[in-house]
Image: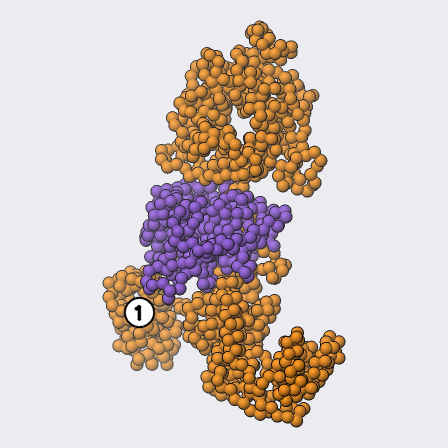
Chain colours: A purple, B orange
Amino acid sequence: MFVARHIAADHKDLIHDVSFDFHGRRMATCSSDQSVKVWDKSESGDWHCTASWKTHSGSVWRVTWAHPEFGQVLASCSFDRTAAVWEEIVGESNDKLRGQSHWVKRTTLVDSRTSVTDVKFAPKHMGLMLATCSADGIVRIYEAPDVMNLSQWSLQHEISCKLSCSCISWNPSRKYAKAETLMTVTDPVHDIAFAPNLGRSFHILAVATKDVRIFTLKPVRKELTSSGGPTKFEIHIVAQFDNHNSQVWRVSWNITGTVLASSGDDGCVRLWKANYMDNWKCTGILKGNGSPVNGNSQQGNSNPSLGSNIPNLQNSLNGSSSGRKHS
Amino acid sequence: MSGTKPDILWAPHQVDRFVVCDSELSLYHVESTVNSELKAGSLRLSEDSAATLLSINSDTPYMKCVAWYLNYDPECLLAVGQANGRVVLTSLGQDHNSKFKDLIGKEFVPKHARQCNTLAWNPLDSNWLAAGLDKHRADFSVLIWDICSKYTPDIVPMEKVRLSAGETETTLLVTKPLYELGQNDACLSLCWLPRDQKLLLAGMHRNLAIFDLRNTSQKMFVNTKAVQGVTVDPYFHDRVASFYEGQVAIWDLRKFEKPVLTLTEQPKPLTKVAWCPTRTGLLATLTRDSNIIRLYDMQHTPTPIGDETEPTIIERSVQPCDNYIASFAWHPTSQNRMIVVTPNRTMSDFTVFERISLAWSPITSLMWACGRHLYECAEEENDNSLEKDIATKMRLRALSRYGLDTEQVWRNHILAGNEDPQLKSLWYTLHFMKQYTEDMDQKSPGNKGSLVYAGIKSIVKSSLGMVESSRHNWSGLDKQSDIQNLNEERILALQLCGWIKKGTDVDVGPFLNSLVQEGEWERAAAVALFNLDIRRAIQILNEGASSEKGDLNLNVVAMALSGYTDEKNSLWREMCSTLRLQLNNPYLCVMFAFLTSETGSYDGVLLNRYIEKLTNEMKEAGNLEGILLTGLTKDGVDLMESYVDRTGDVQTASYCMLQGSPLDVLKDERVQYWIENYRNLLDAWRFWHKRAEFDIHRSKLDPSSKPLAQVFVSCNFCGKSISYSCSTVPHQGRGFSQYGVSGSPTKSKVTSCPGCRKPLPRCALCLINMGTPVSSCPGTMQSVPFLHAHVNVCSWIQQEIWYLQRLSSHKMLSSKEKPSSVELSNRCPS
């Protein structure tokens, strides 16, 4: 179903994150070599590195694109305890000739006292907002009040999670104001991702921990709850897969939230998809080095008996999931 | 290394060989089995590699430790440390012609016999071999041998030689070490520092010591318990790991006073710690009686300046096999590869994968980074369409203008690829709905049109209790019969189902013919019968029976049909009503039901209940065929919602709901959300034209949807949008109130730019400050960009000028658009 091809990345050390822009025509990678590279897709579909620069004085953990409405803007976060916002400068003739673009640092967010482990721009309808989380468990939400001025960011919220944070994910929806998401995940969480909502009546959340878990969050209808107060959610676990054998490192949704890709300690990338009965199944396995896995038959089955309702259980979340939206 | 627990070593240069040693040394050769079968006699190491035993050497009993000669030649020279402290050079018999042949079998004997704990070859001077021994009174415990040194008989005390099991080949004994270190101490582990050939790090009994061979009288040391398994990070020469019980200490040799880091303590004692030779900062540890290897990923070269924070360490564990692991060894060159051996000598070869980070691109390709490499993976084009993801499908459908055919609505399902029966049914339903709406509008321009889109469920509901009867003539029979005259609503419902073409008085002939041509004889006969043409029905059945594909039994049915009698208690009636239940074909079944039933006893209530039930089922399942029942009503939106929940197909949802635009379904916030999401998808795919087409399509069908603002007015001085403050207010509490202008923005006069507070220029005609919202027409400026502000031409001109930033051109502009400017001076609100 899927074929992989190799791209010469030319990073001098491990690559920690890959991120696409809104249109999927540009890509940013970040690495332990303290640099970020920006790649552009040519007409023929090949990727060309158009910028590579040193961004931090430590490993760069994550890189993320802002919505193109705000310009060509990147944010990166690093072990050096900072997060930075970068903007591409257009019209530099020298750089253009060499096929290189020029990126300048617009701001450095220095509030964290520990390694900043994740950075994410908010959905665009919220304006230009940015959330970071750090190893000491503080989620910070910044806002640029003026979208034309990227050097001014005000710290809007600071949420202490008490536990070390590894990842955050914005909920793409605008429908509700605040969510409290407590789960029975007791193992360290390595990645978390809300699926693009697309107008579903519920939200889908994928969690990478010692297995892949998929939750649905269905808002309890307003009529049923007492007026006011935050929206309550019915949380169901719809799938749980331990096919990665050990830790699962990353999860990522496709644009429609219908296919989930996960990577884990078995060195494989697995694709998960729900059938019409809402049973999630493995639809593809690829080895980390791009070669297909022999005997593509180890398919996982979701366990329907796990569909128990587990709302409001004690938060033993190690590594925070922050699916908050503040109105 | 005890005699029972095997250890494992990769050859430093011949990277496809390794040695397993317990009581003997076994040399193995590793082969890839990707393209070949497993050879006889070889052991499987992993899915794609196998090992073949090359040779076994059991010359050296009581092995305590083994170290592989680091030079390229001779290949298979190993130093073996024995329980009596002797170090023996041995070979695995690969090359006996070498000039180094005389090295093999050479023994290096300490003065006093005690256990040899560790061996280390000097990486720079390949002939130097350091051996760490247990304590023996005041003797030295670290001995450095030069393997090329000659036999020195005069120094060897003869009684020591005799002690060692009566050796005869004394010519190979060497007893004079190059250096002797660590007096009155025990040495547990050793490693040479790559910084300098003459620096040796030793884990002594109670401390870690660095010996400098240029000045053996001095040593640098630090007291610690973590003295076992000292090993230098190959990528960061000042970083050293050592362990004690369950704890690993990481040292920085530049500040040797205390460990820079201690890793979390393990409940069981550690047995081996090793840096990965192919990647920076990856330390593998193994504890006793465990089947996992714990990996510590130290991503940071420690900073020598006083950085108090501990580097973040990612801890991972891998489980290469189910049994306990006795030992492991990193492959010297192959990335992150290691081999492990269990106590019963089963081995397995595996690669520790880097953390793979991945991302989906909006155009359904997946990119991931593994280590230093990037991989892109795209869905294959020639894929079976059924397996394609909805994202790909929607993209392709958008390209084929799916949903945009408003004339031949049914054609949309062909544009969608003609593969989904549900979509087919949906678009045909919508097509008929549209058609009948138009028909009814022509007939009576009342409000029946909306009823069509309301679906069968509401149509049937509204038709209840309005049953009229009339008499019709049976054609072909000389009888009359009471037949319910269907009221208009029910006719409509039937029409939607494709039953009766147009009204009751219309000739059904062509429809019957078309059905006959398609081979649907049963249905055609039923339609004919319902139209009270029993002769035609029988004729059709005969036709069907005689055709190739037809069923011969149809003749029998025709025969039965011809015996129709209107008498209430006839045998025919009795038999038919009992036997019809055995008929398989529903059309045939219903024909007899029609004929045998009591006049006027069609149970409308039951039908209604059935439709209700079916509707709920369809809603639950999100089955698009149910749109026929629900129509484009709130029920329809519910149904579509579960369809979207199930498939994520907002495209179909958006287009379908737009069809019902005159109704208020479009105001449903879910529908608006789908439309918005679909537009967003088109944006993400850079389908600008498709999105524009969609917007046009939308505004055609839904007049209430106004295009969003495309042009904004910005301040001449600061470049900020002035309509920003009065735009659709994304942020509460910002806007005018922030700049000291209280009250409603429509009433207040704005005389300065909300951004830079510079005074706004004035209109040359009316002298009102530009950007002033006009009270006579509140909200004009807020919601509509200036190009659409036809209502208030004055403010339009104001903004226009401002936008062009040419105050003086007011005259020019107004002369260009003379009629409006004349008008505008009259209508200026001031």
Check disc 1 and report the residue beneath it.
B771
Q: Position of residue A141 (x, y in %)?
A: 35, 52
Q: Amino acid at mark 1?
A: Gly
Q: Residue at x 67, y 30 (%)?
A: B53
Q: Residue at x 55, y 20 (%)?
A: B129
Q: Position of residue B760 (x, y in %)?
A: 28, 66
> Would you identify the image quadrant in which residue B812 lies?
bottom left
> Would you identify the image quadrant in which residue A318 lies?
top left
Whether residue B119 is visible, yes or no, is yes
Question: Between B410 and A106, which is closer to the camera in this rendering?
Answer: B410
Question: Between B574 and B465, which is closer to the camera in this rendering?
Answer: B574
Query: Considering only vertical position in the picture, is A115 above or below A280?
Result: above
Question: Between A179 and B155, which is closer to the camera in this rendering?
Answer: A179
Whether residue A73 is visible, yes or no, is no
Q: Chain of mark 1?
A: B
Q: Tag 1's secondary structure? A: loop
Q: Residue at x 28, y 75 (%)?
A: B775
Query: Considering only vertical position in the picture, is B564 above or below B342?
Result: below
- Is B382 on the left-hand or right-hand side of A233? right
Query: Considering only vertical position in the picture, is B761 above or below B192?
Result: below
> Would you identify the image quadrant in which residue B15 lies?
top right
- Is B593 on the left-hand or right-hand side of B138? right
Which quarter of the image is occupied by the N terminus of chain B? top right
Which quarter of the image is occupied by the C terminus of chain B? bottom left
Question: Crowding at label 1, few (<14), some or many (≥20) Cα neighbours within 10 Å?
Answer: many
Q: Position of residue A310 (x, y in %)?
A: 42, 54
Question: Between B301 and B142, which is closer to the camera in this rendering?
Answer: B142
Q: Residue at x 45, y 20 (%)?
A: B204
